[in-house]
Image (cartoon, rainbow, N blue to C red):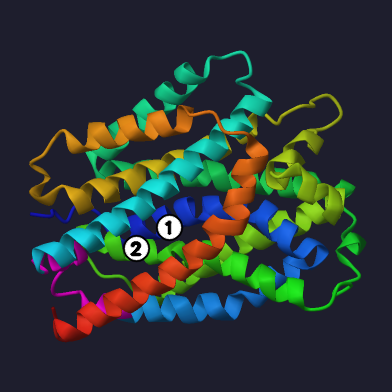
Amino acid sequence: MIQKVIHSTHIYILLIMSTGFIVHVLLLPMILTASNRDSWLSVIGSVAPLILWTVMIYYLNKKFEQKNMFSLLFSLPSFISYSIRILLGLYFFLTAFITFKYTGFWAKLNYTADIPDFLAVVTFASLCYYASLKGIRTIGSLAIFFLPFVVMLGFLVGIGNIKYKDYSMLFPVFERGYKDFFLGIMYACSSSFEIIYFLFITPFIKDRIKIKPLMIVSIVIFFLALGPLMGGIALFGAEEAEKMKVPAYEQWKMLTIGINIERVDFLSIFQWRSGAFIRISLSMFIVNQLLNRDQKKSWILPLLYTLLITSVLIPWDFSSFFSILYSVYFPASLVFLLFIFGLMFFLSRIKGESP
């Protein structure tokens, strides 16, 4: 039986930390590759679809208030239930894998070059495993603890680099027509639409989700994408920002505090790791909930993390990994999220207004 151990505030912050990570880290190089200088306009263009999507998810969630998502999935006929839960489990596992793998590439490039991959991966995975094992209350509490520091560091790097920024580099726009602009909207939506995650977290809350705070979360996610994207273009230019692959964190290398303190980019380690930690822990927790009915099979979560560690340790060059993310994962993710919404809406209808 699912225990209601968190409040709606935990969910809002979990969404900001988890979905915020993908729009702050993974989205930027993708959308810059797709839209180049027009990428910031693509993010702005994604606001209307994001708000509409948020409203749709909110009203879908209201249909499940009397019966939580996991109970619904387990109540379906066995074959259908297993098929849907395995499909969802694979998606959330892949989310954790991509987050972990991209974090590994960045860490190896910046500060773990002399540390064996196995040691770096197992150490971080152990922390994520412990959080997933302890449950949603621990993950939510840690997210609340991390968020103020992450926000503070974000303002520090954003404001501290204003003196170097030239916002004229955001223009001219639409040099290559409008195709790239619309392509960029697709990439922006494929990441921000991950707020559908909260359908799999609401079964654990004591109170109810409200539309206004959820809208605020969506706007925050929007600015988490737009702010570092515009800042990266204004600092480095669109072409150079695209080559960097992690422009939001390259901005840390520009930051100085006064005239005597330089190279404060080590602070970005906490910012990146905390977001990745919450995202991986939460994704793996959801996978375990999907596959482990009543949480009686204690071996499932260790097995999942063993598979995650093994997959992350498999050698894979960054260029081909990035190419797969750009050409396959992000487009497929958007299609999958739309499919999941349609499926959940269909299930809510066949199970009645209060399934």
Residue at 45 percent across and 51 percent down: it is 18
Near-viewer residue (28 or 318): 318
Res 175 quadrant in image: bottom right
Seen in the picture, residue 198 relative to 257 is either above or below; the reply is: below
- Residue 65 in the magenta stretch? The answer is yes
CB of mark 1 within 8 Å of CB of mark 2?
yes
Identity, as a three-letter code, of the amino acid under mark 1: Leu
Tag 2 secondary structure:
helix
In the image, residue 125 lies at what x, y percent?
39, 29
Q: Which residue is mark 2?
A: 198
First to last magenta residue range: 60-76
Tag 1 secondary structure:
helix
In the image, residue 135 lies at what x, y percent?
24, 42
Left or right: where 178 falls relative to 3: right
How crowded is the residue under tag 2: few (<14 C-alpha within 10 Å), some, or many (20+)?
some
Near-viewer residue (129 or 142): 129
Q: Which residue is mark 1?
A: 15
Tell which circle, 1 or 2, labels the residue nearer the N-terminal end. 1
**Residue 79 numbered mark, or none:** none
